[in-house]
Image: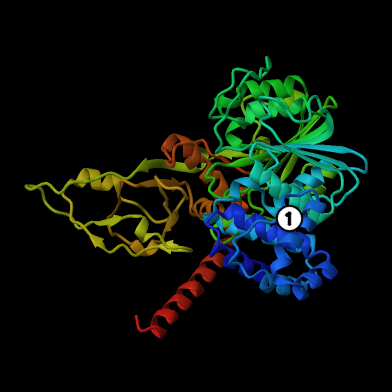
């Protein structure tokens, strides 16, 4: 059904340039198509009366009159919809495709991914006859994740066109107790002093922030570039049990969020933090986390680092393992991804989930520096005019093998500074890291370099482990999800760079030497990959 809906959307785009208008028209068609008897009557009836009949049907739902380009073939669309029983799941998949995948349409600000909605609704655990407040509700896509239907849903948004679409969505899904109003919440809420049982807010990061006369002594002064804090302060006043919030992770460890972290700890509002994978929200390069706040004098905080729970889907990642994440939250047990922390043990400087889940092994772990003979940066070595030239080769990222020993260095570059050459030349079982980059790149030097003088260029950091076993363990660890993430965090915190001090203070997990047992198998698999690559090149006449 998704294919057919996308085809209808593309057809409507030929007649309407505004994508919100296109989405409105197709949603109106979908709502009308729920009544197959009425739909069949429209198809068989007078062509000139279709718009009037469509408008009458929509007004019966409390919506506006049907309005679309007269050149659109109404009956063609209605005939397609007559053949299908479109479910809320079909509509959810369509919204996901339009908003999250086709980001060129510019609608990604108004909804959250399916999996995030589902996880949020699990945490909220909405019961019959409860109430849910959703400021900045956008398209109201959260409703797709709620299994309960018998509750009061209060949604507000500042944009009338978006809220109208949310009304159609809620009607299609079958929510009879949804109350959707246009409002600038910092000026005046449409629901006055409403205090719902629960709340959810995904703060708009792209919208200009007009705080008007909104004040909050605990969390002011507000910064316009950090909209999460005033939105959170506002929403805290409008629920009495539990609230779930999507925030940028920088609030959890940088100076911007210091006042917020102190407030949450002192009030014991923080119940949980879930650290999301990167790149699950379109056009957002920031890292995001989920905050679970509850007004029950929490004694412990649940932290879950789910950064590795994703599948790549097009340009973006999709959150996975929803049930596993929720099961860990319900069990409130320490695990490979989670940790339960006493309030007294919270560090005001850092509320990131990964900070606490990685601290589980602190007592048994050690600094990387303890396993190294030395560490140094590559440097430029000039060939002096009057000096005796020595055969040398340059080593750069281009020479890094994907899996296995790096032993082939083809850039021949004679040098003359014998003392510096001997100081800088790399040895077998050295580990090389890229100094700059968004993503770490790692190599291990093989014994086949022999007596070649190979010099790392200025973009390389050289680590010399104390033994071959340590080198092999370190190489496998850096390629593993846990090690790769630990390296990546160093780059991110240092503006996509890595230096000697940061890498020397990297904390290795207890028993990290066990990674060495996988090294030979990794080499074997790496050789098979190379064989396949060579075979493909031969096949393609390279």
Up-down relation of residue 156 to residue 174 (above or below): above
In the picture, measured across the screen, residue 410 lies left or right of residue 136, that is left
Viewport quadrant of the N terminus: bottom right
Camera-side residue of 524 and 242: 242
Residue 362's quadrant in the figure?
A: top right
Give SS at disc 1. Answer: loop
Q: Position of residue 501 (x, y in %)?
A: 44, 34
Note whether residue 510 is visible. no
Left or right: 471, with 107 as reference point:
left
Residue, far right: 128
Q: Residue at x 54, y 70 (%)?
A: 525
Pick whichever, 367 or 491, lies toward us.
Answer: 491
Q: Nearer the viewer, residue 286 or 165?
A: 165
Q: How many marks?
A: 1
Q: Where the C terminus falls, by quadrant?
A: bottom left
Q: Report if residue 468 is visible in the image.
A: yes
Q: Position of residue 73 (x, y in %)?
A: 63, 70
Q: Is 326 left or right of 495, judged from the image as shown?
A: right
Residues packed near mark 1 inside 10 Å, few (<14), some (14 to 19) or many (20 plus): some
Q: Which residue is painted at 87% across and 48% down in the image? A: 176
Measuring from the top left, give residue 78's x and y in whole percent.
Answer: 72, 70
Q: Residue at x 48, y 77 (%)?
A: 532
Image quarter of residue 9: bottom right
Q: How is the image coloured?
A: rainbow
Residue that carries the numbered disc 1 in the rendered image = 321
In this rendering, position of residue 518 left or right of residue 115: left
Query: Which one is nearer the viewer's eye here, 504 or 48?
Result: 48
Q: Position of residue 135 (x, y in %)?
A: 72, 35
List the single residue furthest toward the left: 386
């Amino acid at each position: 059904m998704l294919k057919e809906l996308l085809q209808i959307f593309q057809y409507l785009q030929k007649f309407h340039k505004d994508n919100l208008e296109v989405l409105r028209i197709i949603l109106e068609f979908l709502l009308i198509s729920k009544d197959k008897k009425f739909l069949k009557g429209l198809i068989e009836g007078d062509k000139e009366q279709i718009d009037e009949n469509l408008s009458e049907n929509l007004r019966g739902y409390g919506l506006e009159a049907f309005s679309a380009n007269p050149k659109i073939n109404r009956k063609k669309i209605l005939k397609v919809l007559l053949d299908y029983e479109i479910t809320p799941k079909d509509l959810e998949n369509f919204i996901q495709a339009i908003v999250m995948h086709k980001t060129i349409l510019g609608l990604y600000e108004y909804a959250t991914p399916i999996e995030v909605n589902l996880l949020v609704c699990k945490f909220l655990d909405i019961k019959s006859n409860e109430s849910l407040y959703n400021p900045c509700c956008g398209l109201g896509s959260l409703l797709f994740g709620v299994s309960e239907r018998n509750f009061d849903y209060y949604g507000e948004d500042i944009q009338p066109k978006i809220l109208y679409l949310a009304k159609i969505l809620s009607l299609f899904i079958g929510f009879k107790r949804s109350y959707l109003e246009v409002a600038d919440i910092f000026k005046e809420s449409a629901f006055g002093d409403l205090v719902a049982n629960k709340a959810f807010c995904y703060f708009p990061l792209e919208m200009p922030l007009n705080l008007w006369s909104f004040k909050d002594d605990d969390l002011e002064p507000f910064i316009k570039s950090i909209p999460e804090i005033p939105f959170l302060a506002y929403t805290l006043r409008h629920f009495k049990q539990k609230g779930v919030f999507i925030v940028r992770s920088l609030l959890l460890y940088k100076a911007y969020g210091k006042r917020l972290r102190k407030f949450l700890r002192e009030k014991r509002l923080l119940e949980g933090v879930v650290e999301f994978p990167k790149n699950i929200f379109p056009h957002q390069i920031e890292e995001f986390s989920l905050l679970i706040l509850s007004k029950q004098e929490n004694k412990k905080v649940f932290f879950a680092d789910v950064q590795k729970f994703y599948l790549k889907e097009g340009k973006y990642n999709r959150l996975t393992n929803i049930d596993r994440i929720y099961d860990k939250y319900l069990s409130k047990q320490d695990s490979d991804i989670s940790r339960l922390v006493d309030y007294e043990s919270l560090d005001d400087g850092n509320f990131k989930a990964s900070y606490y889940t990685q601290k589980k092994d602190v007592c048994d772990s050690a600094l990387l520096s303890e396993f190294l003979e030395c560490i140094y940066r590559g440097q430029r070595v000039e060939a002096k005019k009057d000096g005796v030239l020595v055969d040398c080769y340059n080593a750069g990222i281009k020479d890094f093998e994907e899996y296995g020993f790096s032993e082939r260095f083809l850039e021949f570059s004679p040098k003359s500074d014998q003392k510096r050459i001997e100081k800088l030349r790399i040895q077998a079982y050295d580990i090389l890291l890229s100094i700059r980059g968004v993503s770490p790149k790692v190599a291990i030097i093989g014994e086949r370099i022999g007596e070649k003088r190979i010099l790392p260029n200025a973009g390389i950091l050289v680590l010399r482990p104390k033994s071959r076993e340590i080198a092999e363990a370190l190489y496998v660890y850096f390629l593993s999800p846990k090690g790769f993430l630990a390296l990546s965090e160093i780059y991110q915190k240092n503006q996509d760079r890595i230096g000697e001090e940061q890498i020397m203070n990297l904390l290795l997990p207890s028993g990290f030497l066990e990674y060495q047992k996988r090294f030979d198998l990794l080499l074997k698999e790496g050789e098979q990959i190379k064989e396949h690559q060579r075979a493909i090149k031969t096949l393609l006449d390279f």
